[in-house]
Amino acid sequence: MNILGVSCGYHDAAVSIINDKGDILFAGHSERYSKIKNDPNICLGLMNDATKDHDVHKIAYYETPWKKQLRRFYSGEGIQWGNFSARSILNKQLDRDLGPENYSSHSHHLSHAAAGFQTSPFDRATVVVIDAIGEWDTISIWGAEYDKNSIARYKRLWRQKYPHSIGLFYSAMTEHVGLKPNEDEYILMGMAAYGKLSPYVCQMKFIENEWNITFKDNLHIGFPHEVKDSYNQSGFTKEDLAHSAQQFVESLIYNVMRRAKDFKWSTNLVYMGGVALNCSANRNIGEYFEKVWILPNPGDAGSSLGAAALTYGKQLNWSTAYLGYNISGKYPVNLALDHLLNSSMVGIANGKAEFGPRALGNRSLLADPRGDSIKDKVNEIKQRQKFRPFAPVILEEYVDNYFHMPRGFNNSRYMQVIATCRFPELFPAIVHVDGTSRVQTVPRDGSGIRELLEKWYVLTGCPMLLNTSLNIKGMPMVNDEQDARDFETHYGVKVLT
């Protein structure tokens, strides 16, 4: 029996397929097939790829639509009468007529929690979910464990409801500095390092008063529906606002973590929801828990896997994030080395696409992290703001030689946390202005990127490369062979498949 998990209707639609042994057969994003950034709808190409080798026997939807519609009514957004049931949504999205025995739906935050816990290495864990909004919940804390029959059980310990939302606040700040909400939050995070906090304390109080951000137990905040261009008249910059917003949100996240720790359910943490992608904030969550697991796709797309996991009930066999479209053929290690040694950079599109927003070596633009010019060169190719940092991908056994890894993270296999670089002057291309790097560590897993790094280290004495996603500006990450050719034509950078 194969189970199809579906997340769609809001942003970044995705599907996952698991079998009755807990194997993840496929997981992919709709945008990679439709070429529509953050596509909220299920693309036919995605479904064709997901099901070409796998029959589907049950379908699981990632949230409870009627609850979401009631919240929309409450917030003044209006009810979408055609989206009142999972069956009606799935019939439209999948273009098929489902019988009542063929599908199920689960709550939004529980799908987040299951995607994390049932892929984690833990038998028992505290699960924290922080996002913009589910049906009503914006934050939830769960106690998770497996019973004597190995079925995952979840006990909700605490929750926060709309309109008090950390995720909505951060998205509002993203929009306020001229970026695109629900898409460019990671740019705001990078911009924050260029701002100042000290003179902005009073400004944050001004925002509190003007935007009706309310507090309760040092945790609750209200969503600022009306954005006002206040900082321009106050002598503050967008970078200052980004910095203060980041610091403010971090303090709220840590309050949630303290609350979660105080339940004393487990010293293991599973952290999920879109806010879990804030790798700057993640650097300190190890202060509250001994071990941390964050799925590489903790947002709504990853909940397609969570919905399927809930229907399955047991622990999934998680081993890799390479779960999407497959570009067959041997990983081009030797050709990549030639390009790196001769031109300092190369694109690689090979093997199965990554499930999640991070390029982890199979859809990556790689470059030599040493030298003063490479960062600007790669930024120019990708047409990015010059202040934005790049990530290092490093042989895992050498990470402590080059980075101060934060507590709770002895590795970072999915770029989930920042670490301070020990030698920023040697690797300017992968170090941000604040001295940190969003590290990806590669274990001895037999992957193509592992073999490439090993040979690069032998030839250069450097165990790391610069790694950024292979995508044309404004477009989703490269998915298939045609996308790779388009990138090569557009930017004049060789892409090896």
Image (spheres, rainbow, N blue to C red):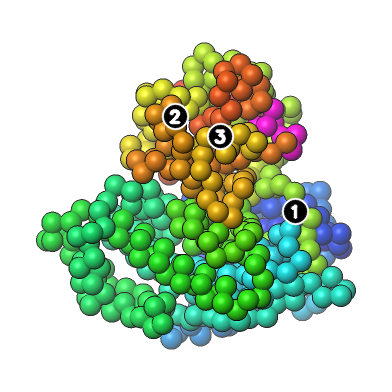
The residue at 69%/27% (across/down) is: 451
Please rate how many residues cluster around mark 2, counting C-alpha atoms within 10 Å: few if below 14, some from 14 to 19, many from 20: many
Say what amino acid the circle numbered 2 marks. Phe
Between circles 1 and 2, the one closer to the viewer is 2
The secondary structure type at the circle numbered 1 is loop
Answer with left or right where residue 375 lies relative to residue 82: left
Q: CA distance from mark 1 to mark 2?
A: 33 Å
Residue 98's place in the image compared with 477, above or below, is below
Label 3, on which residue? 401
* Quadrant in the picture for residue 159: bottom right
Q: CA distance from mark 3 to mark 1?
A: 28 Å
Residue located beneath label 1 in the image: 318
Q: Is residue 440 magenta?
A: no
Q: Position of residue 74 (x, y in %)?
A: 43, 86
Q: Earlier in the sequence, mark 2 or mark 3?
A: 3
Q: Give the mark nearer the N terminus: 3 vs 1.
A: 1
Q: Earlier in the sequence, mark 1 or mark 2?
A: 1
Q: Classify residue 430 by image quadrant.
A: top left
Q: Relative to 26, is 255 above or below?
A: below
Above or below 249: residue 211? below
Residue at (62% x, 65% y) in the render:
269
Residue 78 in view (yes/no): no
- Residue 341: x and y in percent read 54, 15
Q: Which residues are magenta?
A: 445-451
Q: Which residue is mark 2?
A: 427
Badge 1 crowding class, 10 Å Cα cut-off, few under 14, some 14 to 19, many 20 or more, is some
Residue 151 placed where, x, y %? 81, 72
Q: Nearer the viewer, residue 38 or 89?
A: 38
Tell me, yes or no, whether the highlighted magenta stretch contains residue 448: yes
Q: Are marks 2 and 3 in contact (CB under 8 Å)?
A: no
Identified by mark 1, the residue type is Trp
Q: Which mark is residue 256?
A: none
